[in-house]
Amino acid sequence: DRDVTGVQTCALPISAHVTGAPRSTLRWLLDGKEAPNLPSQSLAGGSADEAAEWTSDGRRHWIRVEVRTPEGVLELLSNPIFLNWGAS
């Protein structure tokens, strides 16, 4: 795609760097809900660089990451990344 304007669709590579969260799970959230096309990832070691790719549908969205312990306790909640939020 020549422009990422929100009208066209494109694949967006995203990544998260997590440290100090052994055995936890990283979840990608799209508009506050677990994104079905961005699977959860187990963080086996103390640190990890996790990557995913999300394909835009041209509408406004936001993506963020959460990391939870094996017991489900929230350890990390990233800032949101706003997508397709330009002038309409």
Image (tube, rainbow, N blue to C red):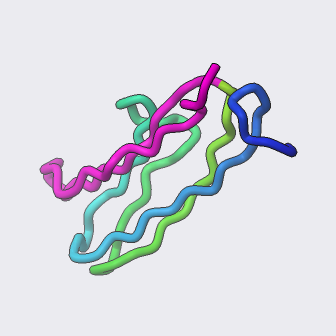
Query: Magenta stretch?
Result: 59-88
Q: Quadrant of the N terminus?
A: top right
70 w.r.t. 33: above or below: below
Give the farthest residue toward the right: 2
Quadrant position of residue 63: top left
51 with respect to 48 (left or right): right
Question: Residue sitting at 62 percent across and 44 percent down?
Answer: 54
User: In the image shown, does 86 or 29 lie closer to the viewer?
Assistant: 86
Quadrant position of residue 59: top right
Position in image of residue 64 (x %, y %): 39, 45
Give the farthest residue toward the bottom: 46
Q: How many numbered callouts?
A: 0
Q: Quadrant of the C terminus?
A: top right
Question: Residue sitting at 72 percent across and 46 percent down?
Answer: 11
User: In the image shown, does 26 or 70 lie closer to the viewer?
Assistant: 26
Residue 72 colored in magenta in the image: yes
25 with respect to 82 (left or right): left
26 with respect to 38 (left or right): left
Question: Residue sitting at 56 percent across and 56 percent down?
Answer: 14
31 with respect to 52 (left or right): left
Position in image of residue 35 (x %, y %): 48, 36
Residue 9 colored in magenta in the image: no
Give the farthest residue toward the top: 88
Position in image of residue 66 (x %, y %): 30, 50
24 w.r.t. 32: above or below: below
Question: Residue sitting at 72 percent across and 34 percent down?
Answer: 5
Position in image of residue 61 (x %, y %): 51, 30
